[in-house]
Image (cartoon, grey):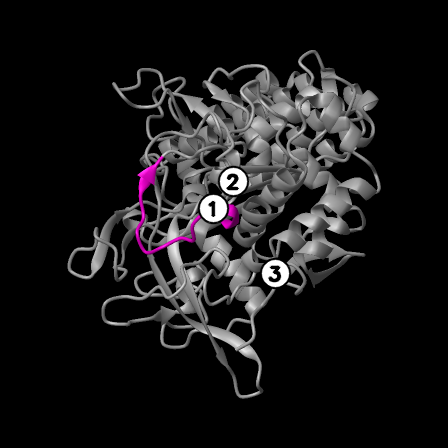
Amino acid sequence: MSGFDLRDEPWIQAVDGGHVREVSLRGALLGAGGLSGLAVVDPLETVAVLRQVLIPVVMDALGVPEDSAAWARRFSPDGFDGDAARRIGTYLDDLADRFDLFDVSRPFAQVAGLRTEKGETKPVSLLLSRLASGNNVPVFSARTENDPPALTPAAAARALLAAQCWDTAAIKSGAAGDPQVKAGKTTGNPPGPVGQLGVVVPMGATLFETLMLNLPIATAGGRRSDDVPQWKSPEPATSRWQTRRPRGMADLLTWQARRIRLIPETDASGGVVVRRVVLCAGDRLNSSVHDLEPHTAWRQVERPKKGDPPVRPVRHQPGRAAWRGLAGLLAVRGPTAERVSAPDVMRQVAGLQTEGYVADDFPLRVLTVGVSYGTQSAVVDDVIVDEIPLPVVALAADSRVRHTLLQVADEAEALRIAANRLGDDLRAAYGAAKLPWDRGQRLGDLLIHRLTPVVRRLLAGLQHQPDMVEDAEDAWRVVARRLAWEVADPVLSAAGPGAFLGRAPGERFGPRLAVAEASFRRALNTILGPASATAAPPARTATA
């Protein structure tokens, strides 16, 4: 059966001229200046392709810039210059035997001949968290484990990389030849290393700009000689795995968290497809990687236990828009009040902006991706993905835009709390208990949903016109107040007769409709300032 050369066969999903198309590894890198970026068709695969292949190839082929000035010399609106393109091409040519997906002796990111003692295989859906496999059965999956897809080699390559990053935890099939197998299984497997993070990826207008924004600038210690991508490891991977610390960033980005073998076959039309796979335990991290990991924010642990790391990664929360975490994204000069520090890639962009190597009007976007695991991290409950524009000037410590964005995020959170309190006050007027935090839809959540497109427009507007910050603040407060009343008015108008007098009519300020509305009105004035004559809602009978 023929192989599948990742260097020259199309498999990476990229955006070209507004359309998604598959390009080869060589085409993605050498044509990076003309591609809009990676297509976020499957966000887990997008992150995996960027981290596991594209960034490490650039790092290894060109080396990392020794300082910001060296980074700036590489940065060009047209992509990699002639010398860099030649070096990347030579790198790929010299490693021709390392990028074959179905190579007999060293298949890419796999273990040749990997098998279980009984020769069992699993459906390829095991690599796809969005499809049913074993006890991982997404609610809206259109397939069952007995009906796995037939993946093209391109799709199988992307799924393979995603599994190395995001695979679920718990029991894995035991590999023949692995001395740590017990009863045909391997237990205690953690989720894939990226699944334990809240991934933050800065992106530019082209794939080249995205690669450059995520390319690390050398640290004072430099890069270790044995810090190489997995495909340059002196020996091919075997069924034996180990627990260790990464040797450096190249090792970390291409970490082999699972031992995998894709099983290609020929379909009825004569094409190569992958329906079955062997997936076993892989290497485990034995320490925190906060000194190496570039794509996640970190929260300081107030009183870490002896031997525990002083920080832990900040993970994205299901249903929480990325803009609500602006404080963490902008914490490039030090931790926030909640002890959160920005990801290293954002700190690096901030430094480049401060030194004048990234323009103030640079069209920076931020992609956030994370996974919410279910029972014992053995199933995927949700994939969290969002993308927002971010004004580069907001990364500067003394920026008025930065102050405005942080203020907007704080005010939006205060409005959410005020709307939730209004709902609680109305329930109290009826004599009902507060709505549990994990039950039903709260007014604050509805308000945040309506505020989200407003904040996105504000971010995009300030990205293009940062000098309009005062107008943006005024517009925000007017629109935020209007939306807050649009959320509050229906529930106030629908209040029944019992809410007018409340459950304790004799109490002057007991829970009742008028008190709830007055409290909400005061909260809006406290958060957004006194309402102007044009912005204030009409007086309601209930408050008379």
Instruction: Report how far apart the C-alphas of labels 1 and 3 lie in the structure.
Output: 18 Å
Helix, strand or loop at disc 1?
loop
Q: Nearer the viewer, residue 460 or 471?
A: 460
Identity of the residue drawn at 35% across and 23% down: 309
Q: In the drawing, does residue 98 fall left or right of residue 510?
A: right
Q: Earlier in the sequence, mark 3 or mark 2?
A: 3
Disc ID at residue 233:
1
Task: Check contact, mark 2 vs mark 1: CB within 8 A.
Answer: yes
Q: Residue furthest left?
A: 183
Q: Which residue is mark 2?
A: 228
Q: Which residue is mark 3?
A: 6
**Amino acid type, residue under disc 2 in the picture:** Val
Decide which of 451, 38 is in the foreground and name it: 38
Give amino acid for label 3: Leu
> Quadrant location of residue 215?
top right
- Circle 2 sits in a helix, a strand or a loop, which is it? loop
Image-quadrant location for residue 356: top right
Our reading of the magenta stretch's main secondary structure is loop
| Residue 234 is a magenta residue | yes
x and y, in percent, of residue 397 in the image: 66, 13
Q: Residues within 10 Å of mark 2 (few under 14, many from 20)?
A: many
Can you tell which of label 3 and label 2 is closer to the viewer? Answer: 2
Q: Nearer the viewer, mark 1 or mark 3?
A: 1
238 inside magenta stretch: yes
> How many other residues sit within 10 Å of disc 1, few (<14), some (14-19) or many (≥20)?
few
Which stretch did the figure color magenta? 231-244
